[in-house]
């Protein structure tokens, strides 16, 4: 009976924090949209960007707001969560700054390198092995290469999403696909810190996708 109650409470918390991320992101998109248009904080169609009309640059802000709200609800600010939220906020600020002043690539890469390196330092989260790559019978351990590999992977992924964010709905749909892939590849699908963040981000991407394609 006690175990059943604990499972129910866990499920209730899961539904709540996912719903909070969705609703807060949705409200942020609705409320910030007219403000962004008024301030001309918008993206315009170009040779690289196939947007329909002017697109307010509020997606990252709204998704991060939903993520932050969900984590405040869970109130589990351990070292990992705090470090990830801080590094995410710094990447967000860098993105906003880039949208405003159009930073050159070298400056962005240097700042991204510092943010990712500090995050690894404080959380010790890094890619330590590549599994049984290409059908190999051996678990490919990265060893001392884990830190530089993680830095390159995170920076590459960040800039890849930035580059494909030129067609309405593409980045959001790819982000949702990525979160689903992460959750399916992780056997520990309970209410653990890492999965909480992934679920919250995935939930926040849904209203962002809806806004992008409507």
Image: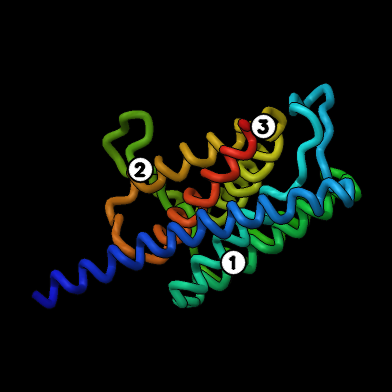
Q: Quadrant of residue 110?
A: bottom right
Quarter of the rendering occupied by the C terminus: top right
The residue at which mark 1 appears reads as 85
Scheme of colours in the image: rainbow
What kind of element bears circle 2?
Answer: loop
Q: Nearer the viewer, residue 139 or 203?
A: 203
The residue at which mark 2 appears reads as 131
User: From mark 2 to mark 3, how far is it between C-alphas?
Assistant: 28 Å
In this view, the mark in front (2 or 1): 1
Q: Mark 3, residues whose alpha carbon is within 10 Å: few (<14), some, or many (≥20)?
A: some
Q: Position of residue 129 (x, y in %)?
A: 41, 49
User: From mark 2 to mark 1, how far is it between C-alphas?
Assistant: 28 Å
Q: Position of residue 155 (x, y in %)?
A: 65, 47
Q: Is residue 169 left or right of residue 101?
A: left
Task: Please name the residue shown 68% across and 61% down the image.
Answer: 115
Q: Are marks 2 and 1 in contact (CB under 8 Å)?
A: no
| Label number found at residue 164 | 3
In this view, the mark in front (2 or 3): 3
Task: Please name the residue shown 64% across and 45% down the image.
Answer: 158
Q: Nearer the viewer, residue 55 or 127?
A: 55
Residue 139 makes an appearance in the image: yes
Task: Please name the residue shown 27% across and 35% down the image.
Answer: 137
Q: Nearer the viewer, residue 107 or 61?
A: 61
| Label number found at residue 120 | none
Looking at the image, is mark 2 or mark 3 earlier in the sequence?
A: 2
Task: Please name the residue shown 41% across and 42% down the image.
Answer: 180
What kind of element bears circle 3?
Answer: helix
What kind of element bears circle 1?
Answer: helix
Looking at the image, is mark 3 or mark 1 earlier in the sequence?
A: 1
């Amino acid at each position: 009976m006690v175990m059943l109650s604990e499972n129910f409470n866990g499920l209730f918390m899961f539904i709540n924090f996912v719903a909070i991320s969705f609703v807060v992101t949705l409200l942020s998109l609705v409320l910030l949209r007219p403000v962004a248009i008024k301030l001309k904080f918008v993206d315009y169609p170009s040779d690289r960007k196939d947007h329909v009309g002017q697109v307010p640059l509020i997606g990252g802000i709204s998704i991060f707001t939903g993520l932050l709200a969900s984590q405040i609800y869970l109130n589990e600010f351990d070292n990992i969560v705090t470090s990830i939220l801080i590094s995410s906020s710094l990447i967000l600020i860098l993105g906003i700054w880039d949208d405003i002043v159009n930073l050159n690539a070298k400056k962005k890469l240097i700042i991204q390198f510092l943010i990712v390196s500090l995050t690894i330092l404080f959380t010790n989260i890094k890619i330590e092995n590549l599994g049984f790559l290409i059908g190999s019978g051996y678990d490919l351990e990265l060893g001392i290469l884990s830190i530089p590999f993680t830095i390159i992977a995170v920076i590459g992924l960040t800039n890849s999403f930035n580059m494909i964010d030129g067609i309405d709905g593409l980045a959001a749909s790819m982000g949702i696909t990525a979160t689903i892939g992460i959750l399916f590849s992780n056997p520990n699908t309970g209410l653990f810190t890492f999965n909480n963040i992934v679920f919250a981000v995935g939930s926040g991407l849904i209203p962002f996708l809806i806004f992008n394609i409507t």
